[in-house]
Image (cartoon, rainbow, N blue to C red):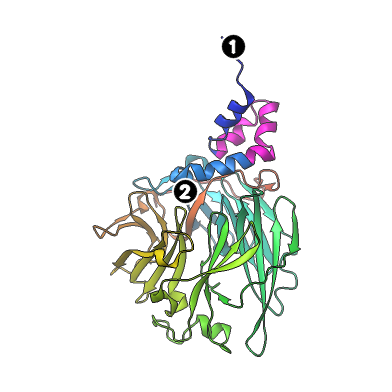
Amino acid sequence: MSDYIPPELVVNILSWLPTRSLIRFRCVCKSWCSLISSPNFIDIHTHQLDASLNHNTRLLAMRRTGPVNKRNKAYLLDFDSEMLCVDDETVGIDYPFPIPAQLCCTSCNGLFLVSCSVFQGLWNPSIRRKLVLGESLFGFVAKRTYFSALGFNPKTNDYKVINIGYELKLDGSHCSEVRSYSVKDGAWRGISAHAPPYDIVRNMPSNVVVNGSIYWIANHGVSGTSYFQAINPPNLFDTVDDLASNSIMVFETAEEVFREIMLPKSLVSIATRNLRLKAIGDSLSVIQYEKFLNLRSIWVMKKYGAVESWSKKYSFDFELGFGRILAFRENGEVVLLNKDKDLVAYNPVTQQSTNLTAGGHNNLYYGTTYKKSLGLLLEGEQISATQTCEVEPISSG
């Protein structure tokens, strides 16, 4: 019996393996190292992420273990397990950047974009690689309102960072400039698309990525209304904002064009601060917060782009004041971060909740769904031991 294995079969088998296994298997032989590190294999492995549905999806939770910006740990948790099992291969990953970790503003196919006015970087926690983007916001900050997001172009298998700069004129009009960073090319360029003259909500994690494209909650406001008036109604407890005219702004990464998706009618005129975007599988959803984060409604768009396909999936009241919704389990439960910074699973049908902090996943300040990938394996820089502290397991204390 021959020991020969066709190369295409080797590629197919390896492409279904976890990222950390693939990193180790590069040491098996030169041919495997060359194969796993090749752009073609990384592209194939990236496509398998979508085929694997939720089986490759984790919850990335950030925990502060020391002074701000000094000791920030990331944990990849299996949020479909009963008590959020810790991924043994990625326990206690040190956050690698010198700016606050809560500035992680987008997750897409295994990468995180960390962005502020003086710094932008990409981070892949599962394979511990990073990429610092140089001079990305030059010229955007001084006289502009700017927004940043990370997407993925499925046609070229390339990650894209998008910076949108708005210049707000005295007459209330907007002038926009859009720049795109290609991870494969390693360079910034201006693109011809002009962002719609809407106010994008940026003082909260409001953008989400679905099928590589980027979605924001946007507010039209009224003519002459200032940016801060439009997104910040005078009363923090208001659920209706007479100045609001909400919709969803989309940047299609493949075509590099902006589009608009209308919200359900009942969400158009509510206070913009009470809306969040979330992905449920490949479906776009909107979370509506009311009564100062006690009542939540979850709307799902069943058919992409069809306004009439919006439907309210859940509506539930939290007397305990649970905080932000992080993820949706396959069994229908919702994973939340509560006011005490603990993770909680809530069943909207039975209205029962389960505290998930038995494994020590407490004192958290950030969480989002995440898929492990080989992103930045070629373009990124390995995070060395001198850049991070020693890996620590989660303690139960």
Q: Residues within 10 Å of mark 2 (few under 14, many from 20)?
A: many
Residue for point 53% across, 35% down: 16
Is residue 306 shown above or below 175?
Answer: above
Q: Is residue 23 magenta?
A: yes
Type of the residue with mark 2: Arg
Q: Residue furthest left?
A: 350
Q: Residue furthest top?
A: 1
Q: Could you tell me how many numbered marks the image carries?
A: 2
Image check: 297 left or right of 55? left
Do the residues bearing badges 1 and 2 touch, measured as CB atoms within 8 Å? no
Type of the residue with mark 1: Ser
Rendering coords of residue 338 (x, y %) = 37, 64
Rendering coords of residue 6 (x, y %) = 62, 22
Rendering coords of residue 34 (x, y %) = 70, 32
Q: Mark 1 falls on what kind of element? A: loop
The answer to which of 76 and 234 lies nearer the viewer is 234
Residue hosting label 1: 2
Residue for point 33% across, 54% down: 333
Q: Quadrant of residue 362?
A: bottom left
The answer to which of 58 and 42 lies nearer the viewer is 42
Residue hosting label 2: 58
Image check: 154 left or right of 210? right
Q: Quadrant of the N terminus?
A: top right
Q: Mark 2 falls on what kind of element? A: strand
Residue for point 69% across, 37% down: 38
The answer to which of 395 and 292 lies nearer the viewer is 292
Q: Which residues are magenta?
A: 19-42
Image check: 67 left or right of 134? left
Is residue 269 shown above or below 135?
Answer: below
Residue for point 35% across, 68% down: 297
Q: Please, what is the dominant secondary structure of the magenta stretch?
A: helix
